[in-house]
Image (tube, rainbow, N blue to C red):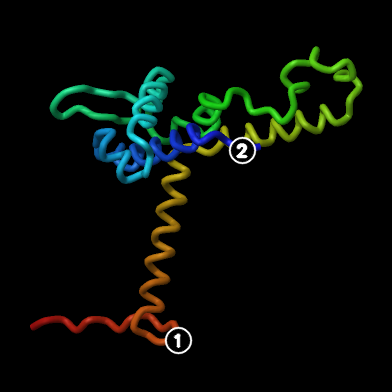
């Protein structure tokens, strides 16, 4: 199962906007498109759709822009993905029992359902804030790695402290 490019762009857009949420920042589509490598025309449609879904707010004019409609911890990945993909399903029989004459006694259908429930549960418990926290941890790990390896040869020693200026 692959998510659509549209859903992927929506997640990237929401993450970008979420980074500025705590400071009350707003963003314009031009900047988001450039920094996230999303075609501007496509981005505009995604912004409109996410606004209609209650995930983004848009304000026109000077000082306007795009912002999250709710706190990052209140927006989960499931609602974002399902806004674009519809209900997550591996097989038609799990969403429409009449699509298969064997749906009631089919063992595989129950396995599909269990997998779908697990996937929905996973995405339901992952908020934009969780993604921001993961991103922050990865960033600090990368920075730490750079400091541990730069100018220290192959030893991996920590950088030497810079002497204080008198």
**Which residue lies most toward the top here?**
98
Residue count near mark 2 (Cα–Cα under 10 Å), binned few <14, some 14–19, many ≥20 = few
* Residue 86 falls left or right of residue 133: right
**Side of 30 relative to 110 (left or right):** left
Q: Which mark is residue 154?
A: 1
**Image-quadrant location for residue 11:** top left
Q: Which residue is mark 2?
A: 2
Whether residue 25 can be seen here:
yes
Instruction: Provide residue 49's location: percent of width, then percent of height.
Output: 41, 22
Q: Check the picture and name the quadrant holding the C terminus.
A: bottom left
Residue 158 on image: x %, y %: 38, 80
x then y, percent, for residue 44: 34, 27
Q: Quadrant of the N terminus?
A: top right
Image point 57% across, 35% down: which residue?
3
Near-viewer residue (57 or 34) = 34
**In the image, is 58 to the left or to the right of 125?**
left
| SS at circle 1 | loop
The image shows residue 99 at horizontal and vertical percentages of 79, 16
| Residue 89 vs residue 23, the one in the foreground | 89
Element on which disc 2 rests:
loop
Residue 69 visible: no
Give the mark, 2 or 1, whose residue is nearer the N terminus. 2
Q: Nearer the viewer, mark 2 or mark 1?
A: 2
In the image, what residue occupies the spot 45% across and 31% down? 75
Looking at the image, which is closer to me, 28 or 19? 28
Q: Which quadrant of the view contains residue 59? A: top left
């Amino acid at each position: 199962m692959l998510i659509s490019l549209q859903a992927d762009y929506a997640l990237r857009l929401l993450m970008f906007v979420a980074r500025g949420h705590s400071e009350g920042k707003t963003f314009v589509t031009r900047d988001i498109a450039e920094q996230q490598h999303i075609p501007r025309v496509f981005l505009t449609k995604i912004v409109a759709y996410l606004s209609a879904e209650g995930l983004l707010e848009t304000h026109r004019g000077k000082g306007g822009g795009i912002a999250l409609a709710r706190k990052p911890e209140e927006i989960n990945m499931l609602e974002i993905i399902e806004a674009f993909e519809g209900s997550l399903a591996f097989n038609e029989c799990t969403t429409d029992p009449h699509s298969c004459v064997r749906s009631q006694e089919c063992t595989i259908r129950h396995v599909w359902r269990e997998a779908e429930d697990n996937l929905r549960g996973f995405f339901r418990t992952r908020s934009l804030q969780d993604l921001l926290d993961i991103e922050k941890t990865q960033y600090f790990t990368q920075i730490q790695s750079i400091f541990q390896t730069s100018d220290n040869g192959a030893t991996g020693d920590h950088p030497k402290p810079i002497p204080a200026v008198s």
